[in-house]
Amino acid sequence: MIRNVQELCWSIMAEQARSSVRHFLEALFANKPDELLIQIWTIADKTSRWFCDVESALRYAASASGQDVYIGVGLSRRDYGPNHRCPSNEIAAIAGLWVDIDLQSDAHPQTALPCTVEEALSLLPTDLAPTFIVSTGNGIHVWLLFRDLYLFRNDEDRAAAAALSKRWNTLIRDNARARGWKIARLGDLARILRIPGTTNCKDPANPKAVVLYAHSDNRYNPDDLAKYLEDHPGAG
């Protein structure tokens, strides 16, 4: 009887993980062009895997949910093989803006960090509600998704997207500095971030679930965010 209950609990947890992976990846890349590739990277074997469709990517991510699994924030025009990531200057599109905020924890023992998710979220402008808040076990990352995928037609588009991401991450970093906290500015287009529904195994003796802390239907236009950041350089 106990074994049956345990198996049921494991089955429910596995299904919840698959649901989180699906919801997240479909929101980011469901409408991407077929020729652009999704990168998924795993720590255990330090390997990149490249997928031309969301269904294949989410099947792999769900199958690896018991380990550290990351997704590239940008799409690639080609497969760079298992030992490389797509460099920032060749990213072809992004789905939105992101910010990665560490929390004070065993993994990040320095005192100059927020202690709670709520403190981390206090760094965000109140009038830019996130699409996703992902709790990674030792921090959070927050996404503002665009209404449509931001496809780069040329180097100028890519540079504009990189500048937008840098300004957004700089705003959050400066808000943190005003509170006496020190967070990294991780806005590069080649960034990889953990996928909800997977596991943070940074401490193998104490694995932590990566979960969707909150999500909404909020979406933004890149131009609107650019205008906001110009008008509110010190918002927070």
Image: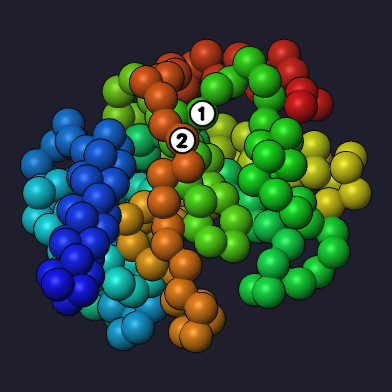
Query: In the picture provided, is 76 more to the left or to the right than 201?
Result: left
Q: Establish if 225 lies above or below 102.
A: above
| Residue at image mark 2 | 214
Badge 2 crowding class, 10 Å Cα cut-off, few under 14, some 14 to 19, many 20 or more, is few
Given residues 5 and 185, the one toward you in this image is: 5
- Asked whether residue 229 is in view, the answer is yes
- The secondary element bearing badge 2 is classed as strand
Q: Which mark is residue 130?
A: 1
Badge 1 crowding class, 10 Å Cα cut-off, few under 14, some 14 to 19, many 20 or more, is many
Type of colouring: rainbow
Along the polypeptide, which appears first: circle 1 or circle 2? 1
- Asked whether residue 154 is in view, the answer is no
How far from the left and from the top, in percent, is residue 151? 30, 32
Q: Cβ–Cβ below 8 Å for labels 1 and 2? A: yes
How far from the left and from the top, in percent, is residue 179? 88, 42
Q: Amino acid at mark 1?
A: Pro
Quadrant including the C terminus: top right
- The secondary element bearing badge 1 is classed as loop
The residue depicted at 20 percent of the width and 74 percent of the height is 2
Distance between the alpha carbons at the discs numbered 1 and 2: 9 Å
